[in-house]
Amino acid sequence: MGKKILMKGCEAIGEAAIRAGCKHYFAYPITPQTEVAEYLARRMPEVGGVFLQAESEVAASNMLFGAAGAGVRVFTSSSSPGISLMSEAISYIAAAELPVVFINIVRSGPGLGGILPAQSDYFQATKGGGHGDYRLLVLAPSSVQEAVDLVMTAFTLADRYRNPIMIIGDGMIGQMMEPVEFHDELASEPPEKSGWATVGCKGRDPVIVKTLYLDPVACHKHNVKLKEKADRMVANEVRGERYNCEGDYRLLLVSYGTMARVCKTAIDELKEQGIEVGMYRPISLFPFPILPIRQEANRPHVQAVLSVELSMGQMVEDVERAVLGARPVHFYGMAGGLVPTPDDVTRAIRELL
Amino acid sequence: MQYRAQREPISPGVERSRHRPSRGPEALTYDLANVIALIGNFGSGKSEVAVNLALTLAAEGRKVAIADLDVVNPYFRCREAMDLLASHDIELVMPDTRYFSADLPIVVPRIKAIIERPDDCSILDVGGDDVGATVLASLADAFRSVRHDFLQVINLSRPFTDTVEGCLAIGRQIERAARLTITGLVGNTHLMDETTPEHLAEGYAFVQEVSRTTGLPVKFVTVDRSLMASVPVDDWSCPVLPLTRHLLPPWKRPEADLGSDNFLLRGRGISPHLHKE
């Protein structure tokens, strides 16, 4: 498109899905991401697509299951409690190896919580949420532009791995407005799906989309297959950004999403005062960027690592897994919808240095 | 009633701007009623315009009340500027602070009062789209009892209002929902930090085109304060409101000299949790 326009994160996510060739959206409204549904209620009919507001997130997520099984590109968006309701279907979709894109614009929890930004669904997204041995490929944008690019990429990845992909953004990513442009080159043609999708079986044996394996050997083999798929993601899909990591910085921050942008402001201001702090910003939360973070933490000038999150400490467990005790790993965070200020982060950094 | 004794109505495309950037905001003259409701599609910038207009009018010595009627969007509402507004003696009419972060359709009785009996001037920041404007329908009779301005805020860079037809369509939807008639336009074209002078000029031309099509006057256009010197506002036929961003994301520093603030930035006296290993 080339020309930049001003879009709210939620609207931009909806438009990105359309640009990626997705014409099926099933959802149930929930703050702070209802604007995705609002936007697509207007846009889907314009492109000959379908937006169906389901009676609940449970219904919406099972519509995704069915539509993906029928071979169409499909996605949904929701927020934390809604994603909890969808978790059963996410497990089924992962088990049935279907490509679906889920957007979680995270609000504070647990329970109904509040409607302001949070990152407290990290465990849910990266460690399960639903039952069984499966992994979601989880991507976390920190700007509206990055959200747009990752949504478009997510449809390609969903097809590549035949696996649900989750884009996770705190409420600020969904609600703020930023200039965006759409990179249509990120869109891909859907692959041939007749080998597994129910696209019509004239002239061949029918395919069955199922998740029931009563034979334990078959079920074990299926789990091994899913594990191998997760291993391929770990090998190929690690994404992240280094910030101010060129010099002899003494403290490594690890932060993502909106929180990473606050950290960048703090890092820039400390730099002006002659204090060097580096940051690694994971973009893929699963696969977690274990090796790049380990590499940064092990630099001789790095004294400690600080995980900064809008939660009470979730990603920090993966940071510890990356650092493997080589450096102390500290945690700094806020929950409930409050966002630490650049000053708050600066104070924490000064306390550690 | 108009704000300045010397003011006569401004006809778009005929008169030159009375605003001279070198003379600062005190040179601003607006042809506005005492009761102003800002409406438009969501994300058109109503809240930021409302806060800036309130501050500018207060700086001119006006007694300003601003009502946050946004029942659509829980983020970046003008209530986030409550401390800033209070420090300029601007009355902020909003639901009880217990419901500060709620997205509930609460209309407090004081809103009707500032429409029917404005102390001086009242600005109503209305939620986006026809959905947000629906709340005005219950206040339509109050509006009709006073001279009011019902202004559509337009940003050329937003989806659905990047064509004249798009602006007309959203305007009609809002008029229907609010049971009120739009009386003027506000040009608010920008791309946040990526706004260029060319872009502002394009936005100005666009709102003039909407004005020609609708016959509605352009009441003012906004220009980012930092770009005021780069834009030929002297050649523009409508007043210009220099705009400072007050409703900021949490990583942005407010402009300290203007005392802007952000409710998320405040942390409300709670310290983040630091767990040292």
Image (cartoon, grey):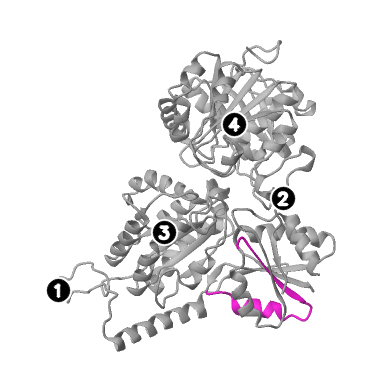
Q: Is residue A216 left or right of residue B78?
A: left
Residue beneath label 2, please?
Answer: B269
Residue at the image position 74 percent from the left and 30 percent from the top: B88
Q: Give the position of the N terminus of chain B as an image quadrant.
A: top right
Which sits in the foreground, A291 or B102?
B102
Q: Is residue B195 left or right of residue A55?
A: right
Query: In the picture shown, does residue B93 fall above or below A132?
Result: above
- Which image quadrant is residue A246 in? bottom right
The x, y position of residue A26, in whole percent, is 35, 54
Residue beneath label 3, please?
Answer: A20
Residue beneath label 1, please?
Answer: A203
Identify which amino acid the numbered label 3 is placed on. Answer: Ala
Q: Residues within 10 Å of mark 3 (few under 14, many from 20)?
A: many
Magenta residue span: A287-311
Residue at the image position 54 percent from the left and 63 percent from the top: A140
Chain containing the residue with disc 4:
B
The x, y position of residue B139, in whole percent, is 48, 22
Q: Give the position of the C terminus of chain B as an image quadrant.
A: bottom right
